[in-house]
């Protein structure tokens, strides 16, 4: 009833706006007229997105009206957003025309110059390809979304696209890459206080934890964050289902499944309801409560899947119901449901193949499923020696595959280690050559400046009698200049660096850099608990020197903070500034400075973390062991 009132109210607003536009054509050119339309589009889009999962058909009506109202507004920023949102709503109801609206919105960003929305559009387009199992195009579009997010300063879009990219790698079983990307998404979400993206990243990272307690804790943190936001009921319900899967106590599992069911029913999240019923059925199956398990699958979950024509879920539910029949020892009935599962899987695969023109794969999958059913039938009916021999051959084949895979990965890892060793050796030789060149230049500079200063002082002293104060002032400037040049030559010389404590050298470097560059530098440098190896001390000094040199070039007016801490066998360098920032990949291609920092860090098995966005300063964290 409330939804009907809402849609009626929206149509009244739309009719009034359209009448105003027809009777007063110039209203769009006034600030009041523009705000009137803009507020209406915002309200319509908000309603569409809020109802996208619970009532997608009404959401489509809201989105359609939003596009019509936005078309009245100049410039076209509101239309870009409305087109993107309508595409997203159509994507939820699996309407192929979603791609048309995404493409139209993307084209409009070029013509009207409103490019901030590109990251969101690329992200939504990628979701369409991901649902069609076209992972290659999904990854390409998500990469475009991330690049647009960095280019136009959209951290929320970056974090969301990283989460979606991790889901793609997770779907392809590349779990190491998936975890790494989820970690990056969580780092960005926390840095920019993005509660929604932080919750999603935490909830997805939970499955990668080493123990169940840690996973449960992370999911609960994710739910707490999402509960403080509007429109996150779908994510909360899904995380409640995951929380139930992690419980060791069946009663605790059912508690979370029932909570998820209650929320899913309230907002009509049919897929979440199906997942909860399916998991509850296995809880009852473990307790041998076969009637309760049958109730969940046969009377609840299967009718829901048939209602929304989700054949992927139907295949899974039929498999579950077959397991229930096997538990009842109704083997003939189990075979019937396994056949139904195969048929449902075939329909699901054909639907995907229709989008990708891959009908052949669906047919092959059906054949494979039939072979599995045939094997199960023989196992249930015959149980003869031929099955035992097949198991033996399968075991032998499995062992051979495992041995081959182990050999392949061992050779690959050995080659990778060799390549890494060669890279480190090359970096070491380059750095040694640089140090040798710096040593030579330091000596030449030291000798040349001494002779030059003597000649200049002598020439000044031989000038005719005049203003002695001026001569003295010039001599003092020359002495200061000479001392600064000698200081530079000392810092270039590795032999000088070897003779002094690293802590004092770093403090002197900071003092001189701040004085000469007139920089706002705040530093906190500790002293090592033990004597550092000479080469490690030189590498640390050169890294800090490179960071401060970059500050003088690009962030001389910024607020700079440098912290260097030492422990017994490790150290950490943290550098931040609020300067102009940069795009790290571009700097790596055009300059040697950043590459040298990474190369020197590798020399002592260190790690480097760099985060910089144009307009948001620079963050470095460099750690190492000695």
Image: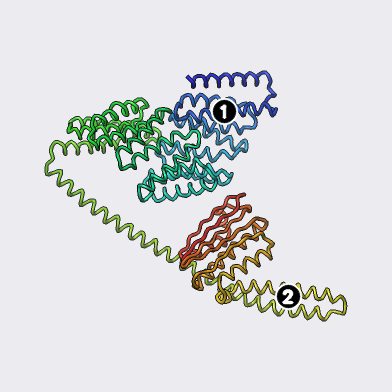
| Structural crowding at the residue carrying mark 1, measured as other residues with C-alpha within 10 Å and reported as few (<14), some (14–19) or many (≥20) | some
Residue 366: name its quadrant: top left
| In the image: residue 547, left or right of residue 343 | right
Identify which residue, 169 or 562, lies in the foreground: 562
| In the image: residue 306, left or right of residue 233 | left
Identify which residue, 543 or 519, lies in the foreground: 519
Residue 482 in picture, x, y percent from top left: 70, 74
Whether residue 149 is visible to the viewer of this picture, yes or no, is: yes
Residue 111 in picture, x, y percent from top left: 61, 36
Tell me the residue that label 1 is attached to: 43
Q: Which residue is drawn at 42% across and 27% down?
A: 266
Cα–Cα span, label 1 and label 2? 71 Å
**Numbered disc 2: secondary structure:** helix
Task: Tally the marks.
Answer: 2
**Vertical arrangement, residue 116 with respect to residue 261, above or below:** below
**Numbered disc 1: secondary structure:** helix
| Structural crowding at the residue carrying mark 2, measured as other residues with C-alpha within 10 Å and reported as few (<14), some (14–19) or many (≥20) | some
Residue 159 in picture, x, y percent from top left: 50, 44
Residue 577 in picture, x, y percent from top left: 61, 55
Whether residue 137 is visible to the viewer of this picture, yes or no, is: no
Q: Which residue is drawn at 51% across and 28% down?
A: 48
Identify which residue, 72 or 358, lies in the foreground: 72
Tell me the residue that label 2 is attached to: 479
| In the image: residue 329, left or right of residue 219 | left
Mark 1–mark 2 CB contact (< 8 Å) = no
Identify which residue, 440 or 606, lies in the foreground: 606
Query: Mark on residue 584?
Result: none
Q: Earlier in the sequence, mark 1 or mark 2?
A: 1
């Amino acid at each position: 009833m409330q939804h009907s009132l809402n849609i009626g109210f929206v149509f009244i607003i739309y009719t009034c706006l359209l009448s105003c536009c027809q009777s007063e054509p110039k209203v769009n050119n006034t600030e009041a007229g523009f705000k009137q339309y803009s507020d209406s589009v915002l309200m319509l889009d908000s309603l569409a997105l809020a109802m996208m999962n619970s009532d997608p058909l009404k959401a489509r009506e809201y989105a359609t009206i939003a596009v019509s109202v936005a078309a009245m507004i100049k410039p076209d920023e509101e239309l870009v957003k409305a087109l993107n949102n309508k595409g997203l709503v159509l994507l939820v109801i699996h309407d192929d025309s979603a791609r048309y609206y995404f493409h139209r919105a993307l084209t409009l960003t070029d013509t009207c110059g409103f490019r901030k929305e590109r990251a969101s559009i690329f992200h939504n387009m990628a979701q369409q390809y991901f649902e069609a199992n076209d992972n290659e195009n999904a990854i390409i579009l998500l990469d475009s979304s991330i690049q647009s997010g960095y280019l136009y300063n959209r951290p929320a879009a970056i974090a969301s696209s990283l989460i979606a990219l991790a889901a793609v790698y997770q779907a392809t079983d590349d779990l190491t890459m998936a975890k790494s990307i989820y970690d990056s998404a969580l780092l960005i979400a926390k840095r920019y206080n993005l509660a929604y993206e932080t919750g999603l990243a935490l909830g997805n990272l939970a499955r990668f934890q080493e123990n169940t307690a840690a996973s449960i804790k992370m999911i609960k943190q994710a739910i707490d964050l999402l509960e403080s936001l509007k429109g996150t009921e779908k994510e909360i319900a899904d995380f409640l289902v995951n929380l139930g899967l992690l419980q060791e106590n069946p009663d605790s599992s059912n508690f979370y499944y029932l909570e998820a069911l209650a929320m899913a029913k309230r907002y009509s999240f049919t897929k979440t309801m199906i997942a909860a019923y399916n998991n509850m059925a296995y809880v009852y199956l473990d307790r041998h409560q076969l009637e309760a398990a049958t109730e969940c699958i046969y009377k609840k979950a299967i009718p829901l899947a048939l209602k929304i024509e989700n054949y992927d879920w139907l295949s899974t539910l039929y498999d579950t119901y077959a397991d229930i029949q096997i538990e009842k020892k109704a083997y003939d009935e189990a075979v019937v449901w396994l056949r139904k599962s195969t048929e449902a899987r075939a329909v699901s695969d054909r639907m995907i193949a229709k989008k990708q023109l891959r009908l052949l794969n669906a047919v092959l999958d059906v054949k494979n499923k039939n072979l599995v059913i045939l094997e199960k039938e023989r196992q249930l009916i015959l149980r003869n020696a031929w099955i035992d021999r097949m198991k033996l051959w399968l075991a032998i084949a499995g062992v051979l595959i495992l041995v081959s895979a182990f050999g392949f990965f061992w050779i690959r890892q050995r080659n990778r280690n060799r390549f890494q060793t060669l890279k480190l050796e090359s970096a070491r030789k380059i750095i040694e050559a640089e140090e040798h060149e710096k040593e030579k230049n330091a000596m030449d500079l030291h000798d040349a400046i001494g002779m030059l200063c003597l000649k200049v002082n002598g020439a000044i002293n031989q000038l005719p009698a005049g203003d002695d104060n001026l001569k003295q002032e010039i001599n003092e400037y020359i002495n200061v200049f000479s001392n600064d040049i000698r200081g530079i030559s000392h810092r270039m010389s590795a032999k000088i660096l070897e003779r002094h404590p690293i802590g004092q050298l770093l403090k002197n470097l900071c003092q001189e850099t701040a004085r000469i560059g007139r920089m706002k530098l705040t530093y906190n440098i500790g002293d090592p608990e033990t004597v550092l190896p000479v080469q490690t001390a030189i590498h640390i000094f050169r890294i800090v020197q490179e960071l401060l040199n970059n500050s003088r070039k690009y962030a001389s007016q910024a607020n700079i903070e440098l912290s260097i801490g030492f422990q017994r066998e490790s150290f950490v360098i943290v550098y931040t500034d609020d300067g102009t920032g940069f795009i790290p990949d571009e700097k790596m291609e055009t300059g040697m400075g950043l590459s040298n920092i990474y190369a020197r860090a590798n020399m002592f098995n260190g790690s480097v973390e760099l985060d910089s966005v144009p307009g948001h300063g620079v963050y470095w964290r460099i750690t190492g062991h000695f």
